[in-house]
Image (cartoon, rainbow, N blue to C red):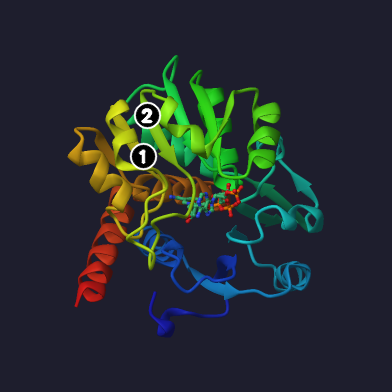
């Protein structure tokens, strides 16, 4: 939407986070609004005070918001209701405002499930999940719901053990990763994300024991982990599809309309390729 097209009826959506300036969510949601001819705009909101931000959302009647780091858990205490899935995951990445009520959802789990299913079935397969933060919760929920067998691996044992109890799956500390194997390794830690692109969460030799490696990081498109996985013959999957699918589910929850998913994915790939060319210069 061009600013000249904004008028008194334009509906406002956005993302709350800190930081938010690198988010690709404005790109995909504004593209979808444009393609569907909707009078709506999606904006980034850099937030310090989440409680204050929620007052603002109510006062300005903002229809929907994506929620990102570091507010996915904290926001729960400021909204009116949370759907059963988001409650089970313990994190919210989406809110919707209707008739004086703010409802929280989680679409990350659907995003990761749909992206894995494009490469391999989940049922009865073994997944080693690195990390025990908010994203890991969504991944574990999705894997269990689809009949997969996840194993949690985390740097801090107390956090890994807590998730192991909640999601009823085994836990191993990160220093025991050498003993593990499975169908797919999933990195949910931020290790290897821009600008620390020379880091990997596990030693390369571990990767030869997995047929598939999914890094939910999408900036850069090919993390060090994925490069090393490919070298060892594994199928490397980046976090773009997960990102686009979780965004598509948000869009549906807010508008009831089907967004142009493939076009959103292409826009993200194009934008990230431009960024990576610029950062190499
Ligand atoms: N593609 C997508 O759509 C999508 C969606 C959501 C998130 N993400 C990405 O997922 C990543 C994690 O997000 P989050 O919200 O889950 O973060 P988080 O809640 O902060 O959790 C991060 C996890 O990573 C572990 N970790 C952090 N630094 C580490 C290190 N140096 N070595 C080993 N483990 C380390 C932490 O371990 P400890 O417990 O030991 O601290 C923690 O378990 C981010 O990169 C985010 O961009 C992608």
Q: Which residue is mark 1?
A: 214
Q: Residue at x 52, y 80 (%)?
A: 7
Q: How many marks?
A: 2
Q: Is residue 129 visible?
A: yes
Within the image, what quadrant is residue 47 found in?
bottom right
Q: Position of residue 60 (x, y in %)?
A: 70, 73
- Quadrant containing the N terminus is bottom left
Q: Residue at x 37, y 51 (%)?
A: 200
Q: Residues within 10 Å of mark 1 (few under 14, many from 20)?
A: many
Q: Position of residue 57 (x, y in %)?
A: 70, 68
Measure the C-alpha gap from mark 1 to mark 2.
7 Å
Local SS, label 1? strand
Q: Position of residue 161 (x, y in %)?
A: 67, 33
Q: Taking 170 as reference, is 45 above or below it? A: below
Q: Residue at x 72, y 71 (%)?
A: 53
Q: Which residue is mark 2?
A: 184
Kindly tell me whether mark 1's CB lies below 8 Å from ligand 1.
no
Q: Are marks 1 and 2 in contact (CB under 8 Å)?
A: yes
Q: Position of residue 279 (x, y in %)?
A: 26, 74
Q: Going from the N terminus, do you reach mark 1 or mark 2 first?
A: 2
Residue 56 located left or right of residue 263? right
Residue 277 located left or right of residue 1? left
Q: Residues within 10 Å of mark 2 (few under 14, many from 20)?
A: many
Q: Taking 240 as reference, is 114 above or below it? A: above
Residue 180 located left or right of residue 16? left
């Amino acid at each position: 939407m061009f600013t000249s097209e904004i008028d008194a009826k334009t509906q406002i959506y956005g993302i709350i986070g800190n930081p938010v300036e690198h988010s690709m969510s404005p790109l995909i949601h504004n593209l979808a609004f444009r393609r569907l001819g909707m009078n709506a705009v999606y904006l980034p909101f850099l937030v310090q005070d989440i409680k204050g931000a929620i007052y603002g959302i109510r006062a300005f009647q903002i229809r929907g918001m994506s929620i990102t780091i570091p507010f996915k858990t904290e926001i729960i205490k400021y909204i009116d209701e949370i759907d059963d899935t988001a409650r089970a995951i313990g994190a919210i990445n989406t809110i919707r405002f209707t008739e004086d009520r703010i409802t929280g959802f989680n679409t990350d789990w659907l995003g990761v499930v749909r992206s894995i299913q494009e490469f391999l079935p989940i049922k009865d397969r073994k997944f080693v999940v690195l990390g025990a933060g908010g994203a890991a919760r969504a991944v574990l929920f999705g894997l269990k719901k689809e009949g997969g067998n996840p194993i949690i691996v985390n740097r801090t044992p107390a956090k890994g053990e807590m998730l192991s109890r909640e999601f009823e799956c085994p836990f191993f500390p990160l220093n025991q990763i050498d003993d593990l194997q499975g169908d797919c390794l999933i990195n949910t830690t931020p290790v290897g994300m821009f600008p620390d692109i020379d880091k990997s969460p596990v030693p390369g030799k571990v990767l030869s024991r997995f047929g598939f490696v999914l890094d939910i990081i999408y900036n850069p498109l090919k993390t060090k982990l994925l490069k090393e996985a490919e070298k060892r013959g594994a199928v490397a999957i980046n976090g773009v599809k997960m990102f686009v699918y979780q965004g598509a589910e948000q869009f549906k929850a807010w508008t009831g309309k089907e967004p142009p998913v493939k076009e959103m994915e292409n826009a993200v790939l194009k934008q990230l390729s431009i960024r990576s060319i610029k950062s190499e210069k």
